Image: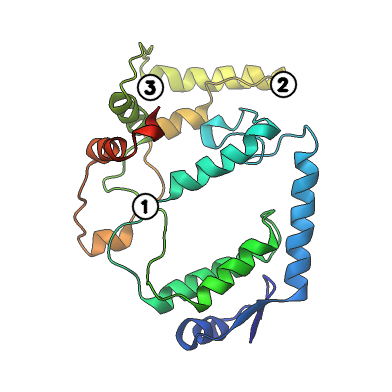
Amino acid sequence: MISIDGHHLGIADVVSVARGNNPVEIAPEGLENIERSRAWLESVLATDRPVYGINTGFGIFADRRISLKDSKQLSRNLILSHAVGTGPALDEEIVRAAMLVRANTLAKGYSGIRRELVQTMLWATQRQQAGVLLYNFSQYPIPTVQEYAETIQKVAGIRRRVFQAPYALLYPMSWAMDSCARLFGLNQPVNPTRLRKLIRSNNIVPAVLQSEQYQNRFDLESALRDWKSERPEDWR
């Protein structure tokens, strides 16, 4: 029996679970870490204190406050936004190893999740047979955030007149605006970091798919249109 607490999982332990399907449990120290982290999260939800990803938006929407009644929907949307997989199924031992390492990370007690989630992951690890693990995926070449936004608006039929300014002019202006806003403790939307994200691609590169010369079935627009045709309710 392998016990995980977030700090003492070794390579030999991972191999014994991945290849030998050794049973795994959460050590008392790991359970204590998880419960402490969850209690902290519950205390945050009971106050008006802004904490990133809990009662705020993500990424460029980090300054958007999310009400308590909408936090459940926020979590659901985050899961749905990552619910995608592609390519050939992974070997069972690779999936077991990945799930074990993730469960061990959660046992460190920094995520605010419930103990039931980690226990469910370990239960699934013991019964892993399908050889399929969902993971973040990006196309290659990887679209920029701006390309994502423009394509989504196109597929959704959203028509908006958007003011456009040259990046070479807007970027230095954003630094000046950000410096002035900081002096007065203000938030302002034209943030230099956000501007860079608009023209830079995501930082997730599907290296394995590239090395295997995997052929994407869809480009970004056709993939979104396929999604819309199958689940139009998601686009209302």
Under mark 1, the amino acid is Phe
The residue that mark 3 highlights is: 167
**Chain-order first, disc 2 or disc 3:** 3
Cα–Cα span, label 1 and label 2? 37 Å
Q: Which residue is mark 2?
A: 185
x 42%, y 50%: residue: 83
Cβ atoms under marks 1 and 3 closer than 8 Å: no
In the image: residue 108, left or right of residue 100: right
Q: How many marks?
A: 3
Q: Are marks 1 and 2 in contact (CB under 8 Å)?
A: no
Task: Assess disc 1: are there few (<14), some (14-19) or many (≥20) residues with their C-alpha within 10 Å of its C-alpha.
Answer: some
Return the disc, 1 or 2, that comes first in the chain's sequence: 1
In the visual, does 164 lie left or right of 104? Answer: left
Q: Amino acid at mark 2?
A: Gly
> Which residue lies at the image location 34% right of the left edge and 33% below the top edge?
232
Which residue is identified by label 1? 137
- Which residue lies at the image location 53% right of the left edge and 80% below the top edge? 14
Residue in front for this viewpoint, 8 or 167: 8
Q: Nearer the viewer, residue 132 or 103?
A: 132
Quadrant in which the C terminus is drawn: top left
Looking at numbered disc 3 in the image, what kind of residue is underneath it?
Tyr
> What percent of the width, then of the height, locates residue 193?
51, 32
Rendered image quadrant of residue 170? top left
